[in-house]
Amino acid sequence: MDLQAAIETGEIPRGLLADLGEVERQHAPRLGQPRNVLWTPRLRYALARRLSPAARTKFWPEIFAFMREGRIAVPVSIVSLATRKE
């Protein structure tokens, strides 16, 4: 998934980046503990609120996989900086 291209073409709103980062920060595993299970409904809510049904169908599997594996924070940070308007 090319998150930056999706934002630049308007398929994904830039505001979703903040939502993804917030879900990751709130529910990241703490030392010796598993990931908080509430991340799944919060992620679904963010996607339902920000994406069209077609975009949800297209991007949900990859966003979910990145979040589940704990690999979303770095791409979100990079794309957020790359797409920032001056």
Image (cartoon, helix red, strand yellow):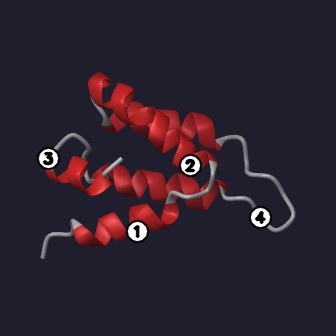
Percent of width and height locating residue 19: 43, 51
Q: Which residue is mark 4?
A: 30
Residue at left 63%, top 51%? Answer: 69
Q: Earlier in the sequence, mark 4 or mark 2?
A: 4
Percent of width and height locating residue 61: 48, 34
Q: CA distance from mark 4 to mark 3?
A: 36 Å
User: Looking at the rendered structure, which numbered label has been put on residue 63?
Assistant: none
User: Looking at the rendered structure, which numbered label has been put on residue 9?
Assistant: 3
Percent of width and height locating residue 83: 21, 65
User: Looking at the rendered structure, which numbered label has been put on residue 77?
Assistant: 1
Q: Which residue is mark 2?
A: 67
Q: Residue furthest front?
A: 1
Q: How many marks?
A: 4
Residue at left 53%, top 40%? Answer: 64
Amino acid type at image mark 1: Ser
Q: CA distance from mark 4 to mark 1?
A: 20 Å
Please give left or right for residue 82 compared with residue 19 in the image. left
Above or below, 48 relative to 25:
above
**Label 1: how many Cα within 10 Å (few below 14, some 14–19, many 20+):** some
Amino acid type at image mark 2: Met
Q: Earlier in the sequence, mark 2 or mark 3?
A: 3
Q: Are marks 4 and 3 in contact (CB under 8 Å)?
A: no
Q: CA distance from mark 4 to mark 2?
A: 15 Å
Above or below, 76 relative to 38:
below
Residue at left 62%, top 44%? Answer: 39
Residue at left 46%, top 52%? Answer: 20
Q: Earlier in the sequence, mark 4 or mark 3?
A: 3
